[in-house]
Amino acid sequence: MTTYTKADRAPLTERQEARRRRILRATTQLAARGGYESVQMREVAELSEVALGTLYRYFPSKVHLLVATMYDQLDQLHSQLRRRPPKSAGARERVVDTLLRAFKGMQREPHLTEAMMRALQFADRSVGAEVDTVSRETTSMILEAISGDEPPNEPTTEELAVIRVITHTWHSSLIAWLNGRASIAQVRTDIETVCRLIPED
Amino acid sequence: MTTYTKADRAPLTERQEARRRRILRATTQLAARGGYESVQMREVAELSEVALGTLYRYFPSKVHLLVATMYDQLDQLHSQLRRRPPKSAGARERVVDTLLRAFKGMQREPHLTEAMMRALQFADRSVGAEVDTVSRETTSMILEAISGDEPPNEPTTEELAVIRVITHTWHSSLIAWLNGRASIAQVRTDIETVCRLIPED
DNA sequence: GCACATACTGAAACCTGTTCTAGATTACGC
DNA sequence: GCGTAATCTAGAACAGGTTTCAGTATGTGC
């Protein structure tokens, strides 16, 4: 019965926790500068003052590293949202607001976003657990937006299906935007379109 | 005013066309066996009896190669669909049928599917043009399903938005299935869910 | 059929993700 | 504090995508 806070990690000593933070910070920094390909494992190791082998002990691959970074960022976003939740009238509107607000944040750091999203989409089975964590976090953000002020109650199967579809759309259209294959307006439209699946209340 | 058939390629001599086919065939073969990571450029070159440099002249990267393969497969699927189009009553049903039929085909070659989809999702700006052709092909398949027997007329902006969302969902949920993060039933549900965005007629 | 430009070949070289190894260093139970 | 196990470090080595190059083959205009 060992339940860890925040994404089930084994307990770490302080120095280890510090190393982990340094690694994530370095990754964020490099990613923000030049995106996915600028995150080079040797550079991350050097910048975070950790040996390459140690980096790999903490994060078993570049994709793991970037997905963990994504979780980290998502977590910050989630806190912000809890502090100042969207105030719109209906569930649908609140979800749209939430996603557009997230999108606005991502527009500020397009390279970072690109690095994290590419990794998330490229992740294979071996990263399953970590991707699931990100996915759960996203789900609960949307669920909270749907619930509004009420404490979120157990989601129905139907709700979960809709949320999955929203998440899929959210990720893919973000990627399309990052790749220059979709405009900001198009991302907004896609979000609004998919959110029509949420029943008006 | 030079318009080429099938995805705008410069004209090739017969031997060049043959080489191109050999490369695509080899890629399909290797991908079908072991997925994305089994498609190794040196092996593709060897199997298609072409020098590595030549392979790169035809397809400037592994991702280009796999996206081209995707286009190729999609094209075959499209032909099949034209020969035996879905016969269901409403537009929505026909789209669901189309996608589920495609899904069934992909279940037969999961590794091949994985290789192509991973590449498609991982593609960056430099592959923009090729990804667009795949995207256009997908769009027209769905559009034809919507139109049914009628010749498809000019799609509205609204229709295009819905189709984009459907495509996004389609790709992401396929990936989730390939990664073992979603069941076949879930993919089916997601498709049915997103297709509710198509108005009943 | 010749001359030239373009394309193809084989092989080496390069880059970056990943793995491995031998030797410090650190954490921890006693 | 001491001994042991786990962790960390520096650096070499390996793997597969990509680039490069010298030489050969092919296609094209004349």
Image (cartoon, coloured by chain):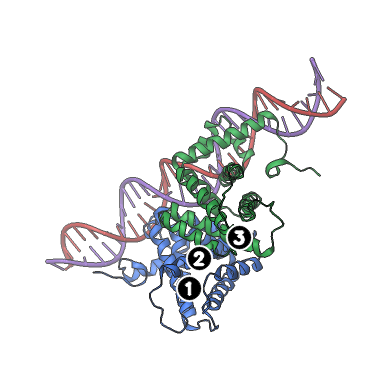
Chain colours: A blue, B green, C purple, D red
Residue A114, label in figure: none
Dot 1 amino acid type: Ile
For label 3, the residue is B164
Comparing A150 with A33, the one in front is A150
For label 1, the residue is A142
Q: Is residue A31 visible?
A: no
Decide: is D13 above or below A124: above
The chain ID associated with circle 3 is B
Distance in Å between CA atoms under marks 1 and 2: 9 Å
Dot 3 amino acid type: Arg
Q: Residue reaching furthest front? A: B89
Comparing B119 with B84, the one in front is B84
Position of the N terminus of chain A by quadrant: bottom left
Dot 2 amino acid type: Thr
Say which element carries label 1. Answer: helix
Image location of residue A5, percent across then percent down: 33, 72
Say which element carries label 2. Answer: helix
Q: Which residue shows up at 41% across the image and 67% down it?
A: A157
Distance in Å between CA atoms under marks 2 and 3: 14 Å
Q: Nearer the viewer, mark 2 or mark 3?
A: 3
Please state the total of marks drawn on the protein image. 3
Circles 1 and 2 in contact, beta carbons < 8 Å:
yes
Distance in Å between CA atoms under marks 1 and 3: 21 Å
* Circles 1 and 2 on the same chain: yes
**B77 sits to left or right of B10:** left
* Circles 1 and 3 on the same chain: no
For label 2, the residue is A167
Image location of residue A144, percent across then percent down: 45, 77
Circles 2 and 3 in contact, beta carbons < 8 Å:
no
Decide: is B54 above or below D17: above
Ranked by sequence position, the earlier of labels 1 and 2 is 1
